[in-house]
Image: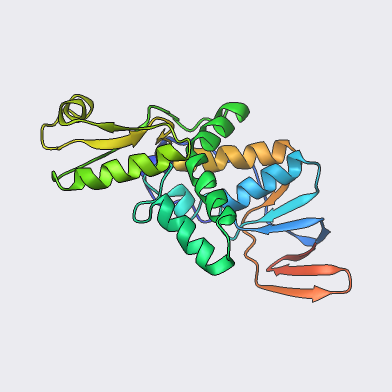
Amino acid sequence: MTTPMPPSLWAATAPPAPPTMPLAGDARTAVAVVGGGFTGLSVALHLAEAGVPVTLLEAAQIGWGASGRNNGQVIPTLSRIDPDEIVAAVASEHGGRDKGEELVGLIRDSAAFTFDLIRRHGIEAEAVQNGWIQPAHRASRLKLSAARAEQWGRRGAPVRLYSRAEMEALTGSDHWHGGWGNTTGGRINPLGLARGMAAAAIGAGAVVHTGSPVQGIQQGPGGWVLGTPRGSLTA
């Protein structure tokens, strides 16, 4: 029997997960995915949509870990490293700027990608795409806000810098000195998103097994063999 989700607002309000069962016996697939969080579910969904046979194995239940327990903000940026720094860091490791800019583009478009996915599959995740803002709690932080808005704006992100009056109007507080934001951000019920992605993946043809912790992975003549308590999956 699958362990129930710990009590939370998300667990109390998210639509139920699609019916799934533990892996039992021996099975075969083209691609095996380990883990039913956002990353694994996205991989399974997009492979299934492309016509690739895929089976996902989740140790507990869909969205069991951080994907079902985070604060639900959809933020198209990183908190402590900015685009120019990302590009420079990747260039120093790989000898070129293209991969760094590709990573920045992935981050820039991440919120739009998420909300488009929710709309395309009709996922019930309490999704609200009304933008994201980062207020500046000191006047000196406005320089950082301006730098971030400039760097992301230079790369085509829909960002803007906000004055103190604009930030007060947005937040209802006169504590802030201004700030910056991105209009593609928003919020979701993360557990609802995970469960909706699982339903969409299954609808596209993916096989999803919960209660199936992977206890070992070995390479054999027929592919990779993933062992679970009640069965095995060859990919």
The residue most toward the right is 221
Residue at 54% x, 46% y is 106
Taking the spot 66% from the left edge, 49% from the top edge, the residue there is: 43
| Quarter of the N terminus within the rendering | bottom right
Q: Number of marks in the image?
A: 0
The image position of residue 123, as x and y in percent, is 56, 31
Relative to 35, is 14 on the left or the right? Answer: left
Q: Name which quarter of the figure residue 176 lies in.
A: top left
Q: Quadrant of residue 73?
A: top left
Image location of residue 93, percent across then percent down: 54, 68
Residue at 41% over, 37% down: 153
Quadrant where the C terminus sits is bottom right
Q: On the picture, is 183 further left or further right than 23?
A: left
- Residue 62 seen in the current view: no
Residue at the far left in the pictured view: 174
Q: What kind of colouring is applied to the model shown? A: rainbow
Residue closest to the eye, 218 or 3: 218
Q: Position of residue 19 (x, y in %)?
A: 64, 42
Query: Quick check: 189 above or below 64?
Result: above
The image shows residue 119 at horizontal and vertical percentages of 56, 27
Give the camera-side residue of 48 and 198: 48
Res. 54 in view = yes
- Seen at 13% across and 46% down, the residue is 138
Give the left or right position of residue 14, taking residue 30 as reference: left
